[in-house]
Image (spheres, rainbow, N blue to C red):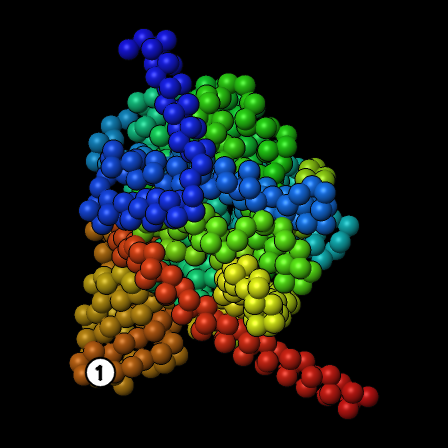
């Protein structure tokens, strides 16, 4: 079919669609159609309809969404003459349009994402010279040693692999700081890391000044190295042995390829997962991005650099002047610059690194604030929609990635909108209870069904809303500040070596309890008005249910900001690996049950448990991941527990040199398949109804737990105040 007939067909389809979507129908018909569409979508899903059937279901859902937008635009806005109602009503309308826009972009990107690429580790023939960059600023030396050891142990010819530690914490600027304490710390760090790199046969590199943060640090490494390819790992991102074998081959296939990006997999829960205790049962928040969205972006040649766990072409980087540093999210900005000059990217959906997430809620918010501000800088300075050199799909993909971080604005509006009616009797949404049921409730049901279609087992119902709510409270001022002054934000390293030694409220928890209290008052007002104003009961019930939904979300957030005590210093990972336990020159058969970056749990087959003394020393002997070497790893014995012929030993690593860090890295990071198995075990779809019931139960429990933490905190504050007054 030629261009003119094709254009005519599409024009006819669009005109017909607009006619049908704007066709006036009564409320009963609208309700029947909405129920029918939702039922059809679920029938297709239950029958596991894929391909064209999936697109048909999404198309029907889109029709209901567009029908809602038309009704919302033409019939529900308050008159402009009632300015006190029109302004908040119009802001609510804009917030809903933003949600529809993001849904449309999501449909475009992930309606039919690329399937995961097959493994290519066994087919690697050519081995280009690779420089591995590990940028660091203030990370712990032991953490760095493990990452460097894992990088050195990758399956790749030794003469084709050069590992670099790019230290921005020991620059000449910091060593000459006017602050004596800062200067001494930088000097000591400089000396210790130089020694570590010398022992591990890693190149240590620093620079004179800390300019352009991480981008400047990477560019300094780029200027001092010469490898054809550059692999980048954050200081807390340790690669598996097959990382390079799974990635470098793509550059031989496509000379215009600038990036092969892999997922960021984390061995520890983020603060929400830890405090809600969902890490082992539910997919992590980032899995929706790396498991679905990046594959969708990859379809449109728009998968972007995520700052780590990636391989980049030196030739491509040098063509645009290296890593971009105008924004504080240098990764996405760099990818945007290279995509716009005709370079291509590839996304490999296989976890090939294991990293660490922020431990405390405050650090988590700090990290997300940097991401949000950086994306706003890209939106302001680069404007992807009008960036020359990008294809239309690439423009839409980058707009989706940047516009997403505006979510604090609509989230805040959805939170406070019921207050205008309940507290001030302002009708900012002109509709009856029946119309709300026929249009708005149908839209919500279809929207959630479409989200379940798109993300299914990667994101459970209401979890996205919870993550956005807990971020909104603190990200809203951060996003406003960068919009007003886009050059103000500076790069701040996210702390990864923190720990929660005791159960407590987060230091930034106060706003969440204030919001919860206001929502409780609003709910009481709603119940009161239902009884005292029965002639407006239908509208009040609708607004009260809206406020109740906000209350459920806010209650669950109280559990999020109630920090649970960590029972171990680092996350343990189940491995089940045979070994031998050495004690006083004797060797006993054993198995390593789980490991962490600090220690391991071992089952020793030894009836005489008295030989194993807590506080004593021992040795683990095991074959490395591919069995080419025998590792001897010194340990301290921290605990023991006997059950029949088996003694369970809790031990702490006692590394004496760089080779010991290699054995630790081999235990934890060498085998990438264990990360895939763990992810697969969590990826199940509870369904919309069961997932909603689970979330309601979770919210109820976390609300109670948060209030208990709050009561304890208030009691402790009063006790300290009383003690201080008594001391005076």
Q: x%, y% of residue 60?
A: 34, 38
Quadrant location of the N terminus in the rendered image = top left
Q: Look at the picture and state if 446 lies above or below 3.
A: below
* Nearer to me, 177 or 512: 512
* Nearer to me, 398 or 186: 398
Please state if 406 lies on the left or on the right of 457 as rendered. Answer: right
Does residue 480 appear in the picture of this structure? no
* Nearer to me, 695 or 173: 695
* Nearer to me, 445 or 557: 445
- The residue sitting at 28% across, 70% down in the picture is 602
- Report helix, strand or loop for mark 1: strand
Q: x%, y% of residue 374?
A: 59, 40
Q: Look at the picture and state if 556 lies above or below 478.
A: below
For disc 1, the neighbor class at 10 Å (few under 14, some 14 to 19, many from 20) is few
State how many labels appear. Answer: 1
The quadrant holding residue 252 is top left
The residue pinned by badge 1 equals 643
- The residue sitting at 54% across, 26% down in the picture is 385
Q: x%, y% of residue 576?
A: 23, 63
Q: From this viewpoint, which residue is outermost toward the right?
A: 728
Please state if 623 lies on the left or on the right of 303 as rendered. Answer: left
Please state if 422 lies on the left or on the right of 584 as rendered. Answer: right
- The residue sitting at 32% across, 8% down in the picture is 2
- The residue sitting at 55% across, 59% down in the picture is 539
Q: x%, y% of residue 89?
A: 63, 47
Please state if 102 lies on the left or on the right of 642 as rendered. Answer: right
């Amino acid at each position: 079919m030629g261009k003119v007939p094709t254009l005519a067909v599409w024009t006819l389809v669009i005109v017909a669609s607009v006619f049908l979507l704007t066709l006036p129908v009564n409320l009963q018909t609208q309700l029947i159609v909405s129920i029918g569409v939702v039922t059809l979508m679920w029938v297709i899903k239950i029958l596991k309809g894929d391909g064209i059937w999936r697109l048909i279901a999404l198309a029907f859902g889109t029709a209901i969404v567009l029908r809602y937008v038309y009704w919302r635009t033409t019939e529900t806005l308050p008159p402009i003459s009632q300015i006190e109602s029109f302004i908040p009503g119009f802001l609510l309308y804009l917030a809903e349009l933003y949600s529809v826009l993001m849904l449309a972009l999501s449909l475009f990107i992930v309606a039919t994402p690329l399937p995961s690429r097959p493994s290519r580790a066994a087919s690697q023939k050519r081995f280009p010279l690779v420089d591995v960059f590990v940028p660091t600023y203030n990370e712990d030396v032991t953490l760095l040693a493990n990452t460097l050891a894992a990088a050195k142990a990758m399956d790749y010819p030794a003469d084709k692999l050069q590992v670099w530690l790019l230290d921005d914490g020991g620059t000449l600027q910091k060593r000459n700081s006017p602050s004596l304490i800062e200067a001494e710390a930088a000097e000591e760090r400089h000396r210790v890391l130089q020694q570590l790199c010398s022992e591990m046969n890693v190149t240590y590199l620093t620079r004179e000044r800390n300019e352009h943060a991480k981008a400047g640090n990477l560019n300094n490494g780029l200027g001092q190295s010469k490898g054809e390819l550059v692999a980048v790992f954050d200081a807390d991102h340790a690669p598996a042995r097959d990382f390079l074998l799974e990635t470098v081959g793509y550059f031989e296939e496509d000379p215009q390829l600038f990036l092969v990006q892999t997922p960021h997999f984390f061995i520890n829960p983020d603060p929400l997962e830890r405090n809600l205790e969902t890490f082992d049962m539910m997919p992590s928040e980032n899995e929706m991005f790396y498991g679905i969205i990046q594959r969708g972006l990859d379809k449109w040649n728009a998968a972007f650099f995520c700052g780590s766990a990636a391989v980049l072409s030196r030739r491509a980087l040098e063509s645009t002047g290296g890593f971009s540093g105008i924004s504080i999210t240098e990764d996405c900005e760099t990818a945007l610059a290279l995509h716009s000059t005709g370079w291509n990217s590839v996304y490999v959906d296989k976890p090939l690194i294991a990293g660490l997430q922020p431990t405390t809620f405050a650090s988590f918010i700090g990290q997300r604030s940097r991401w949000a501000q950086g994306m706003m800088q890209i939106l302001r300075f680069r404007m992807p929609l009008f960036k020359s050199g990008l294809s239309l799909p690439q423009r839409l993909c980058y707009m989706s990635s940047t516009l997403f971080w505006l979510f604090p604005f609509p989230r805040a509006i959805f939170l406070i909108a019921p207050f205008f009616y309940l507290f001030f009797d302002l009708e900012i949404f002109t509709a009856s209870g029946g119309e709300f049921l026929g249009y708005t409730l149908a839209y919500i049901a279809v929207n959630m069904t479409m989200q379940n279609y798109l993300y299914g087992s990667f994101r459970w119902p209401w979890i996205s809303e919870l993550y956005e709510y807990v971020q909104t409270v603190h990200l809203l001022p951060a996003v406003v500040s960068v919009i007003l002054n886009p050059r103000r934000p500076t790069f701040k390293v996210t702390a990864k070596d923190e720990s929660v030694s005791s159960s407590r409220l987060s230091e930034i928890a106060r706003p969440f309890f204030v919001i919860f209290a206001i929502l409780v008052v609003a709910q009481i007002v709603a119940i009161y008005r239902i009884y005292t104003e029965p002639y407006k009961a239908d509208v009040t019930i609708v607004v009260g249910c809206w406020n109740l939904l906000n209350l459920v979300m806010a209650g669950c957030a109280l559990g999020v900001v109630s920090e649970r005590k960590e029972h171990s210093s680092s996350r343990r990972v189940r491995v089940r690996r045979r070994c031998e336990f050495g004690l006083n020159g004797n060797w006993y058969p054993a198995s390593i049950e789980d490991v962490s970056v600090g220690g391991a749990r071992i089952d020793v087959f030894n009836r005489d448990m008295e030989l194993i003394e807590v506080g004593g020393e021992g040795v683990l002997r095991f074959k490395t991941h591919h069995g080419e070497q025998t590792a001897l790893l010194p340990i301290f014995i921290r605990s023991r527990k006997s059950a029949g012929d088996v003694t369970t030993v809790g031990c702490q690593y006692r590394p004496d040199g760089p080779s010991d860090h290699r054995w630790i890295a081999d235990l934890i990071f060498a085998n990438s398949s264990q990360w895939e198995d763990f992810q697969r075990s969590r990826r199940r779809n509870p369904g919309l109804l069961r997932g909603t019931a689970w979330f309601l139960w979770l919210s109820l429990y976390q609300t109670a737990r948060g209030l208990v933490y709050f009561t304890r905190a208030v009691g402790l504050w009063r006790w300290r105040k009383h003690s201080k007054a008594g001391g005076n």
